[in-house]
Image: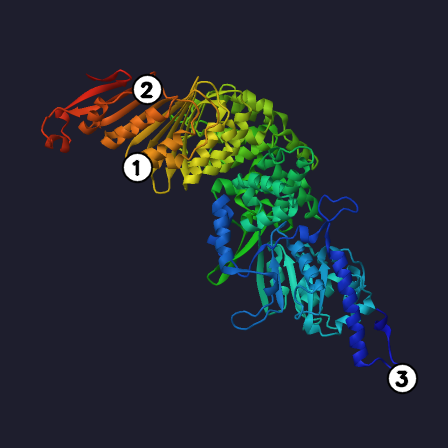
């Protein structure tokens, strides 16, 4: 920096010397920025703790257009895979990278000011830190901006007295006001000011009444100078990037100089969430466990589009990994994550609230309930202001301006429908005992004019699940730190209600998975054991069971010693969901499932996983595997003293049942076996059957016992030395097959029976058989042993 004060001995410094001195200051400034912005101080960082920015920052999805009402509603209502499809559609059309924020538009117009809007916790300040770091490192805006200044509105609020722009900037960076004055006179057209958190700026007077200040050296209150910079009164040639929550962008756009460009941080796409988890954990095994766990919960994977939620979940799991390798204990409930998120925003994004935290949250809950009752996610300004005294000050509300013919309409929403559901539940449990009881009684009331019992409106299901999650003792402890208390009688009544419902679950026309969700969110093992004690059969009529539903089923089943039956045959499970609940199949005496598979490898893996799993004595498992081309493979697995596996193919209707005394793992290519049954490849069958240990019994169901099938069956008898019993059930026993059997024998200790229809008509070609007139046929049973052939009429 010595060059900054250099001058010639003959007079004032030359232009070249001044440029050199300014360049030296800027270079030093970049070095200081790199040093300061390289690391991130997280919400839970202790003194001196930090992580590298490169280990945390993930590019969010940024759009450069306003979205209409239908698009907003679609984003707020969708979740899980449908939400990711919505984000993908937005991404493919309009997403931009940081380096293109100031690029000319289709008409060649380059913006002087860019608004970067985003919800609380969506990563606006983090993105600004990344821009500063990349500019100082020479990786971003290298040719476009010689200098980038960063002003935080939180810090502007703390500046007292009157200051010039240079003095204000010196408060937020490592340069002196004299050095900054020199830099400000150097190519202002290649200078960028980043104003971070405009919504947090406290204005002491009305923006429109402020007198303009155009002199760079003129002094005024910090917020006045900042507004003049935004208007373009000071340094009109410079460029501006202003971040703000949506609640303040309409004020900002009226203040900001033009030409303007609007952009919005949507949060993380699914790919962005995965990248964030990878960077956070670094350890590949930990990353895979954590990310897979979150993907199983539709609500959480949707909420992970909010970067702060990603951080909370990753931090929670990482803390648990320090003490246990069981990642499932690191992410207990959806409710607990939402409570952590709310508490994080309350602590770090609610500065200068005009009301207490309990008052604000209760008013938000009242607003959320109103939207739930009316089934609205977009709420008009009048409704919001009737309930929430300072909607602009709440970090949990979003504000939108929609075009209505010749005017604009202001509307609000929660970040997502799930947050609206959460705040409704929070409102219900924080109410006084009587009022809380009244609210829940309305939800759980029984219609006396109907034979059907209604446990709650379907769109309130998630509200009730969140309510049970808020009863969890660890969650309640977190709420109490913010002065929020759940009445003990509210806890008691909700628990009494669910106990009554699950004890009489077969008399109610309700969804069993709903109760499993409630118990999962409550997450109190002893109570769940008590509730599940009388639950003999878990049954669902839902056509599709979600990953979150499987997670709840897994947890509740693990709390039980034994359950009579799991019947999900009406549902369609994905292979991923099938694997999720695989650890608890052994808890059930009877299991009925319907699984959609997309490949032969899926079928092989899933059946092998079943046969390798823990089993109960006298257990029966029925699984219908459906391929994308609608072909089916039905598996019946029964375990008693022996293990029996039955494969039934769909076209043609043929089956193979194998019974083994040895209950060791059976690994085979099941998809290949089903093809073999179709095609009648005896050599291939021989190789597959060798994978079965101590094969004792075999049952085959055929359409016709042809010459080929007869030879095949005789080969099986000779090659499988452990086989003692073989049964063949055929629709027709053809003469060509019977003739072969009449000349055949089996091994000692191996008996074979064939049962089916034979034609009594002696003519070579029976037209009645061809016309399916069965009056000419007779049902018989053929016995084949080491003694020879015999046939009886049935």
N-terminal-most mark, 2 or 1: 1
Q: Disc 3 vs disc 2: Cβ atoms closer than 8 Å?
A: no
Residue under numbered circle 2: 747
The image position of residue 90, as x and y in percent, is 50, 56
Res 558 quadrant in image: top right
Which numbered circle lies on residue 679? 1
Give the vertical position of 30 relative to 635 (above or below): below
Q: Which secondary structure, mark 1?
A: helix
Which quadrant is home to the C terminus?
A: top left
Give the quarter of the image for residue 173. bottom right
Residue 278 is left or right of residue 45, and the answer is left
Residue denoted by label 3: 10
Circles 2 and 1, Cβ within 8 Å, touching? The answer is no
Q: Is residue 459 visible?
A: no
Mark 3 or mark 1, earlier in chain:
3
| Label 1: how many Cα within 10 Å (few below 14, some 14–19, many 20+) | few
- Seen from this angle, which residue lies furthest bottom? 10
Q: Closest to the observer: 26 or 660? A: 660
Let me know if residue 764 appears in the view.
yes
Q: CA distance from mark 3 to mark 1?
A: 103 Å
Q: Earlier in the sequence, mark 3 or mark 2?
A: 3
Q: Secondary structure at mark 2?
A: loop
Percent x, y of residue 190: 68, 72
Residue 457: x percent and y percent?
A: 46, 34
Report helix, strand or loop for mark 3. loop
């Amino acid at each position: 920096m010595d060059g900054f004060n250099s001058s010639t001995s003959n007079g004032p410094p030359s232009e070249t010397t001044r440029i050199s001195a300014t360049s030296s200051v800027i270079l030093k400034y970049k070095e200081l920025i790199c040093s300061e912005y390289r690391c991130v101080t997280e919400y839970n960082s202790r003194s001196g703790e930090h992580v590298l920015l490169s280990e945390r920052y993930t590019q969010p999805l940024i759009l450069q257009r306003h979205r209409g009402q239908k698009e907003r509603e679609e984003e707020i209502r969708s979740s899980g895979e449908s939400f990711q499809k919505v984000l993908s559609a937005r991404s493919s059309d309009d997403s931009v990278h940081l380096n293109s924020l100031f690029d000319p538009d289709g008409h060649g117009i380059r913006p002087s000011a860019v608004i970067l809007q985003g919800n609380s916790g969506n990563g606006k300040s983090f993105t600004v830190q990344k821009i500063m770091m990349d500019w100082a490192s020479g990786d971003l805006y290298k040719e476009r901006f010689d200098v980038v200044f960063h002003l935080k509105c939180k810090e502007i609020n703390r500046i007292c007295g009157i200051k010039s722009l240079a003095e204000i900037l010196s408060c937020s960076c490592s340069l002196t006001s004299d050095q900054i004055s020199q830099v400000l006179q150097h190519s202002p057209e290649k200078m960028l000011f980043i104003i971070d958190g405009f919504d947090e700026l406290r204005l002491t007077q009305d923006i429109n009444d402020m007198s303009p200040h155009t002199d760079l050296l003129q002094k005024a209150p910090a917020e006045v100078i900042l507004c003049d910079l935004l208007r373009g009164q000071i340094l009109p040639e410079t460029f501006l990037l202003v971040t703000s929550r949506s609640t303040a962008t309409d004020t900002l756009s009226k203040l900001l100089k033009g030409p303007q460009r609007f952009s919005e941080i949507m949060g993380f796409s699914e790919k962005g969430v995965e990248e964030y988890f990878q960077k956070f954990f670094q350890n590949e095994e930990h990353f895979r466990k954590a990310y897979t766990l979150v993907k199983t919960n539709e609500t959480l994977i949707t909420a992970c589009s909010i970067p702060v939620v990603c951080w909370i979940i990753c931090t929670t799991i990482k803390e648990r990994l320090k003490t246990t390798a069981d990642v499932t204990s690191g992410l207990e409930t959806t409710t607990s994550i939402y409570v952590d998120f709310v508490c994080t925003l309350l602590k770090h994004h609610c500065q200068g609230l005009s009301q207490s935290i309990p008052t604000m949250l209760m008013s938000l809950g009242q607003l959320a309930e109103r939207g739930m009752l009316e089934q609205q996610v977009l709420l008009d300004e009048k409704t919001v202001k009737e309930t929430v005294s300072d909607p602009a000050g709440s970090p949990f509300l979003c504000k939108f301006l929609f075009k209505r013919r010749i005017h604009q309409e202001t509307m609000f929403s929660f970040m997502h429908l799930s947050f609206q559901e959460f705040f409704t539940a929070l409102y219900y449990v924080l109410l006084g005992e009587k009022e809380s009881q009244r609210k829940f009684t309305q939800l759980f009331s029984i219609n006396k004019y109907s034979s059907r019992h209604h446990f709650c409106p379907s769109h309130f299901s998630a509200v009730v699940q969140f309510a049970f999650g808020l009863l969890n003792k660890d969650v309640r402890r977190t709420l109490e730190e913010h002065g929020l208390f759940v009445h003990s009688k509210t806890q008691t009544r909700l628990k009494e209600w669910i106990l009554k419902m699950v004890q009489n679950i077969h008399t109610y026309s309700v969804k069993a998975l709903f109760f499993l969700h409630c118990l999962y969110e409550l997450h109190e093992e002893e109570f769940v054991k008590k509730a599940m004690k009388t639950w003999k059969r878990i049954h669902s009529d839902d056509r599709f069971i979600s990953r979150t539903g499987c997670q709840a089923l897994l947890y509740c089943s693990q709390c039980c010693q034994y359950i009579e039956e799991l019947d999900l045959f009406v549902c369609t499970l994905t292979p991923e969901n099938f694997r999720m609940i695989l650890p608890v199949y052994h808890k059930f005496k009877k299991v009925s499932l319907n699984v959609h598979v997309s490949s032969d490898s899926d079928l092989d893996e899933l059946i092998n996983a079943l046969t390798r799993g823990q089993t109960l004595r006298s257990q029966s498992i029925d699984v219908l595997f459906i391929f994308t081309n609608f072909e089916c493979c039905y598996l019946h697995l029964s375990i008693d003293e022996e293990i029996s596996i039955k494969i039934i193919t769909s076209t043609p209707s043929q089956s193979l049942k194998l019974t083994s005394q040895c209950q060791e793992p059976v690994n085979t290519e099941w998809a290949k076996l089903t093809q073999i049954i179709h095609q009648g490849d005896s050599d291939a069958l021989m190789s597959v059957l060798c994978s079965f240990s101590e094969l004792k019994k075999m049952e085959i169901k055929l359409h016709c016992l042809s010459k080929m099938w007869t030879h095949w069956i005789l080969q099986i008898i000779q090659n499988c030395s452990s086989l003692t019993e073989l049964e063949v059930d055929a629709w027709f026993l053809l003469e060509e097959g019977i003739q072969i059997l009449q000349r055949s024998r089996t091994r000692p200790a191996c008996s074979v029976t064939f049962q089916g229809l034979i034609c009594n008509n002696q003519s070579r070609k029976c037209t009645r058989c061809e016309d399916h007139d069965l009056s000419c046929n007779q049902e018989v049973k053929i016995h084949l042993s080491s003694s020879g052939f015999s046939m009886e009429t049935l």
